[in-house]
Image (tube, helix red, strand yellow):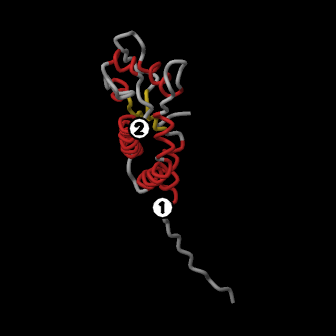
C-alpha cells in the first residue's frame, strides 16, 4: 500500500529578502569632497585642490590626511554601521533612506575628525597670512564642503 505524504510549503520570505539585498548590490554612499564641488577660496584655489593638497601634502604643506585618518580610526564602527543599515534594508527600510542615514552618520564623523584631530600645527608664516592657528579650518569652507551622496545605481 502506497503512503500518501502531505507536503506544506511555508514561505519564509526568501524572495523578498533576495529582492531587498539586490537593491543594495549596486548602491554606493560617497562621503567627502564630491567631484562636483564648485567651491573656491579667495585666492582662486578650488576646495577639491585644497583637500588634495592637505590630504597628501605638498612641498610647503604637510600631509594632514583627514579622509584616510578618519576612515582608519572608525573602521570597526563603519563595518558595524554597514551591517546595521543592510539589515534595516532587509527588514523593509527603503535603501535610499537607510543609506542616507549611513551617509549622514559618516559625514558627521568626517567633519569631526577634520575639526578635532591634533594635526601638525600651522607655521608662523601661515598663521600670519591666514590669521588662524588651526590647520584646515580657518574659513570652514573645507569642512562645509564635506558631504555625502547616495547612488543606488552605481556600477
Cα gap from disc 1 to disc 2, whole angstroms:
50 Å
Q: Is residue 23 above or below residue 87?
A: above
- Count of residue discs: 2
Quadrant containing the N terminus is bottom right
Q: Name the residue beneath numbered marker 2.
A: 118
Residue 36 location in percent, x, y? 43, 21
Taking the view exactly as shown, the residue that stands out farthest to the top is: 44
Residue 24 location in percent, x, y? 50, 45
Residue 80 location in percent, x, y? 46, 54
Residue 102 location in percent, x, y? 40, 44
Tell me the tag on residue 13. Answer: 1
Classify 10 Å Cα crowding around label 1: few (below 14), some (14-19), many (20 and above).
few
For label 1, the SS is loop
Q: Residue at x 49, y 65 (%)?
A: 11
Would you say 20 lies left or right of 101 here? right
- Upstream in sequence: badge 1 or badge 2: 1
Q: Residue at x 41, y 21 (%)?
A: 37
Q: Residue at x 51, y 56 (%)?
A: 15
Q: Is residue 111 above or below residue 75?
A: above
Residue placed most toward the observer, 101 or 58? 58
Taking the view exactly as shown, the residue that stands out farthest to the bottom is: 1
Tell me the tag on residue 22. Answer: none
Q: Is residue 38 above or below residue 82?
A: above
Quadrant containing the C terminus is top right
Residue placed most toward the observer, 40 or 24? 40
Residue placed most toward the observer, 88 or 55? 55
Q: Residue at x 39, y 10 (%)?
A: 44
Taking the view exactly as shown, the residue that stands out farthest to the right is: 1
Amino acid at each position: 500500500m502506497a503512503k500518501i505524504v502531505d507536503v506544506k510549503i511555508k514561505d519564509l520570505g526568501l524572495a523578498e529578502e533576495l529582492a531587498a539585498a539586490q537593491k543594495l548590490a549596486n548602491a554606493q554612499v560617497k562621503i567627502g569632497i564630491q567631484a562636483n564641488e564648485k567651491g573656491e577660496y579667495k585666492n582662486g584655489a578650488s576646495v577639491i585642490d585644497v583637500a588634495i593638497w592637505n590630504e597628501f601634502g605638498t612641498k610647503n604643506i604637510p600631509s594632514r590626511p583627514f579622509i584616510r585618518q578618519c576612515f582608519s580610526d572608525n573602521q570597526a564602527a563603519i563595518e558595524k554601521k554597514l551591517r546595521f543599515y543592510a539589515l534595516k534594508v532587509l527588514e523593509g527600510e527603503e535603501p535610499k533612506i537607510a543609506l542616507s542615514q549611513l551617509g549622514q552618520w559618516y559625514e558627521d564623523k568626517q567633519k569631526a575628525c577634520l575639526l578635532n584631530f591634533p594635526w601638525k600645527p600651522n607655521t608662523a608664516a601661515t598663521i600670519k597670512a591666514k590669521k588662524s592657528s588651526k590647520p584646515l579650518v580657518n574659513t570652514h569652507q573645507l569642512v562645509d564642503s564635506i558631504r555625502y551622496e547616495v547612488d543606488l545605481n552605481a556600477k
